[in-house]
Image (tube, helix red, strand yellow):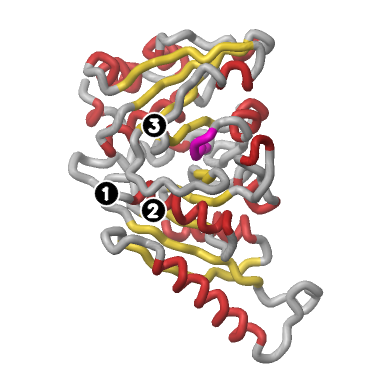
Amino acid sequence: MSPSDFPRRGTSGCIIVGYVATDFGKDALHLGIALAKERNVRLEIVMVAPAHNSFSGVYPHDRGYDSILEEQIAGWLEEALALVPEDIKATARIVPGESEAAALSAAAEELGADLLVVGARKGGLLGRFQMGSAVNVLLHSAPVPVALAPRGYSHPGPISRVTTFFGPRQGTSDVIAIGLDRARRRGIPLRLVSLVLSGESDMQGLGTDVPSALNAYANRKLADSAQHMLDAGHATTEVASGKDVAAALEKLDWEDGEIAVVGSSRMAVPGRLFLGTTASRMLRLIPVPMVVVPAGYMQAGEENNLLPKGGKNT
């Protein structure tokens, strides 16, 4: 079975960038551009404006206020669009909402987005990631994969490699399936990493035997596809082991244009994202963008949304 034959979720070709007029907003935009580079996709740059709320003391409602605010936001969006290279399709919009996270999630569902990109606040362990309140909510509720840009991200793209972390638990199929699918679409290498933590019994990993992991936690078609990419030299496997997440991750090397993919916690509601404890630790340690995948994401709509050959590439 070739990689193009395994069942996968269809894509819309839309990547949403949750934008704010700050450094971490530009980090998100730069990551969106890198992800869209040389791909048949469009960027939708979204800013959230406060919805009408006469009880809000932060955004007092008075006559003419909305037009002034929207004019300012429109100016910020124009500045963002000017940063997007001409070879990438991009549009921008203002969406109202009481909650930035809820408004971005609603926009992602309305537009059928394949990915929601956000930036990290300044600070955080090693100066890489720190989750603001909106990002934290998205990482525990979003209906689509969320990509988090590390502070100061500036790689111009395209993405050079996908690293997918897998382990002996339900959800392995989702994270490996999206890694296989995205690497194949982009024609780039896939690295499958088994995370083995000696101090945690449920993170003993399955070594580098990806097909066995998939046979145990997914299905034969996906296992065959993974084996095909391994046999063809388009995918590799590694074991990252250590007493804890930090020790394990120290053993991995990273490319400047790489992205890491992790699955949701076992506590996630099907169809929703929920960042688990291990992934949260990883988020603060890895130097590249991380994509977190909702539970059951690659199986959603599997019967009706299989993408034929020649479909959109994201």
Element type at mark 2: helix
State which tag comes first along the sequence, 2 or 3: 2
Say which mark, if any, is on residue 179: none
Label 3 crowd bin: few (<14), some (14–19), many (20+), radius 10 Å: many
Task: Name the residue at the bottom extreme.
Answer: 63
Say which mark, if any, is on residue 38: 1
**Percent position (x, y) of residue 250?**
56, 20
Q: Is residue 292 above or below residue 53?
A: above
**Percent position (x, y) of residue 21?**
57, 65
Is residue 67 at least partly visible in the picture?
Answer: yes
Q: Is residue 154 above or below residue 2?
A: below
Give the residue type at disc 3.
Val
Is residue 293 at least partly visible in the picture?
Answer: no
* Residue in the picture at 34% in, 36% down: 160
* Residue in the picture at 60% in, 40% down: 128
The residue carrying mark 2 is: 33
Counting labels gives 3
**Percent position (x, y) of residue 15?**
41, 53
State which tag comes first along the sequence, 1 or 2: 2
* Residue in the picture at 60% in, 14% down: 203
Element type at mark 1: loop
Label 2 crowd bin: few (<14), some (14–19), many (20+), radius 10 Å: many
* Residue range of the region highlighted in magenta in the rendering: 287-292
Give the residue type at disc 1.
Glu
- Taking the magenta stretch, the answer to whether it contains residue 144 is no
Q: Is residue 187 above or below residue 37?
A: above
Q: CA distance from mark 1 to mark 2?
A: 10 Å
Give the residue type at disc 2.
Ile
Say which mark, if any, is on residue 162: 3
- Taking the magenta stretch, the answer to whether it contains residue 289 is yes
In the image, 38 versus 298, the foreground residue is: 38
